[in-house]
Image (tube, coloured by chain):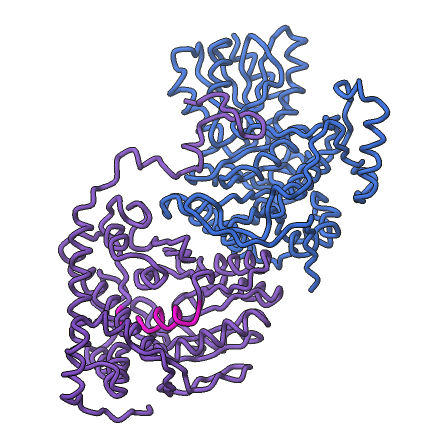
Chain colours: A purple, B blue
Amino acid sequence: MAQLTQRAATFQRTLSAAAFSVSSTRCLNTASTSPITVETSLPFTGHKIDPPSRSVETTPQELLSFFRDMALMRRMEIAADSLYKAKLIRGFCHLYDGQEAVAVGMEAAITKKDCIITAYRDHCIFLGRGGTLLEAFAELMGRKDGCSKGKGGSMHFYKKEGGFYGGHGIVGAQVPLGCGLAFAQKYSKDENVTFAMYGDGAANQGQLFEALNMAALWDLPAILVCENNHYGMGTAEWRAAKSPAYYKRGDYVPGLKVDGMDALAVKQACKFAKEYALKNGPIILEMDTYRYHGHSMSDPGSTYRTRDEISGIRQERDPIERIRKLILSHDLATEKELKDTEKEVRKEVDEAIAQAKESPLPDPSELFTNVYVKGLGVEAFGADRKELRAVLP
Amino acid sequence: MAALLQSFGVASASVASSDHSIKLPAFSVHSLPVIRSEARLISSPILGTRKTGKVTTRAVAAKAENPASAASKPGHELLLFEALREGLEEEMDRDPRVCVMGEDVGHYGGSYKVTKGLAEKYGDLRVLDTPIAENSFTGMAIGAAMTGLRPIVEGMNMGFLLLAFNQISDNCGMLHYTSGGQFTIPTVIRGPGGVGRQLGAEHSQRLESYFQSIPGIQMVACSTPYNAKGLMKAAIRSENPVVLFEHVLLYNLKERIPDEEYVLSLEEAEMVRPGEHVTILTYSRMRYHVMQAAKTLVNKGYDPEVIDIRSLKPFDLYTIGNSVKKTHRVLIVEECMRTGGIGASLTAAINENFHDFLDAPIVCLSSQDVPTPYAGTLEEWTVVQPAQIVAAVEQLCQ
């Protein structure tokens, strides 16, 4: 890992920083957009493709926004943990902390017109696509102000305007949907791509290969992203997959293995993949990442892996720490400013939770809304579906 | 791969998506020249693929010949699969977002010729030949529908769609609900089902009962060329996911249908034969067994009222209820299995709602709860035969 030498924050910097920026958000806005080139932690590994270069172009503003966004996502997930333990969130709650770099890096490389679809570990990707904290927490608590009006829950976050197509509970079923999104993009010729995300557990689903075959056959702009956190619930990848090289599983479809804990590597890979997919069809990206929590809140996460492993990754590969070190070593902000950002983020999350708690539960009548598009479907329409003829009992 | 998208001079404008509008588009429906005159000509499908030039000429010629007697046009005769194709073609002309996907629908023309000629006309992307991967191409269709396309999924045999059950139940049926109304899934899932001529157990399945509990989908069954075309068009235009059940043995039925464009209501039942003594509720192929039995019954002095329920989900309890209030006796004749079938649900629904009007318990004749055997005689005994219907009515009307 190319370690950048850490330089201690200078006192002059602290003083000048204090002079014109009280809050770190202002620091973010006034940060320069002059390019910095950073090397990714690891080189990319390609399968039937030449991997992109390790040098990533970024700007101070981008790095600071990475830090803020990842801190926000981390804070949201930790807060969801406490809410779950307080029984305000029920059912299944799959947390994404540790994997934030994938969400943030991907967003940096694409636009809101590109589509993302993922499985149930969707809170942070929802945030990245433009979802608000209030919508997320309200949905988790089953309130009316949630993004799916409280009727979806943790596993069913969607944001149509942001190009976020969910949020799916059945493992692997979202990949054919993702290829369908890519099909529609090719049909409409709108030069956008779809990122269909799945995990190392879902990589063994047959429908994934069916969808990949079709995407390759018709050159659909689909990018299949395997977020390999090395555990499919309680089963380690070496116990579930004969070939854990998920980026090679596409065989005739090229693949790229990426360090998923490095937001800049993710950004570079996604940018590369988008260019590739628009021209040549599908590509597989394997993001080597890790989740600190268990599979979901009902899983302690320590019966199938050691605490040493978890804390080891936290010390060596944590995505937020990497960006923090980058920022500090390039003198883009001080230690204090970053801590202030984190405090701000914490406050934001607390406020959103308080607001979400105020949000009412859905009306009982909402039980029957949105089953069909026009009411419950017990109306008989005339020809051409315009005049209502009768209401069926 | 040549993706020939037929563009009727459409400008590719990107539409900003709002809450209720569908995010699509390079295409605008309104710029299509939709010909809605009475003299709208559908070229004889019996002669094969139609060519655009020929349509225009004949339309003009027809108009000039008899302008006054346009209303008394007798219509044109065709077979049921041609009626389905006509409906499909008209909808594909009308809306560029309509596309078809399935096995062998494109170059082969469809295993039952429902999509014959469409791939040459609309291109390989709009009439998509998929590999044999029902689970994922149904999923693909649903994903495409989430962005605003209107795909029609053809299951070569409805039985194959069992492989796609997760996609149909979870994603097709539920996405509108779990997304809080953000996404609509205007797909049509269609294909032949039912017991054929010694096709074997796995190719003779009746899946209406398997799908009927899925919340969020609508189910219809067509039985004549007239209602096949109308229901196909209505299903395509519907914003809900619709499963359209066709029957293997009905594809070659011939009927005269109107030349004018028509769309039927998805939720309505069809009154086949009004009567006084008993209400016989049926759908799909059993309609013909019932009508055959009705001839015998009329000779014996009975007056059965035959209703083709068409809409399997939701039931048209309005038409059915009016009939029950008139006759007070109900016989359900269906090809579905006895256990948990359409007849079972219909019996429960009628009992719940119209119990006071019934003079006798509802009799339900369904297929036997067996895998369809190959031997001809055994297969015959699996489904309800006209003689059984006559006997049931006689007993009911005692």
Q: Quadrant location of the N terminus of chain A? A: bottom left
- Residue A301 vertical placement versus B221 (above, below): below
Given residues B82 and B200, the one toward you in this image is B82
Given residues A290 and A262, the one toward you in this image is A262
Q: Residue furthest top?
A: B301
In the rendered view, does A358 fall on the left or right side of B224?
Answer: left
- Residue A200 vertical placement versus B116 (above, below): below
Can residue A98 be found in the magenta stretch?
Answer: yes
Residue B111 visible, this orientation: yes
- Residue B90 vertical placement versus A248 (above, below): above
Q: Position of residue B38 (x, y in %)?
A: 73, 27
- Residue A19 vertical placement versus A86 (above, below): below
**Quarter of the rendering containing residue B71:** top right
**Quarter of the rendering containing residue A28:** bottom left
The stretch of residues the image draws in magenta is A97-110
Q: Position of residue B213 (x, y in %)?
A: 42, 38
Residue A200 visible, this orientation: no
Given residues B350 and B143, the one toward you in this image is B143
Q: Quadrant location of the C terminus of chain A? A: top left
Q: Position of residue B101 (x, y in %)?
A: 61, 51
Q: Residue furthest front?
A: A19
Which residue lies at the image location 54% right of the left edge and 30% below the top edge?
A: A385
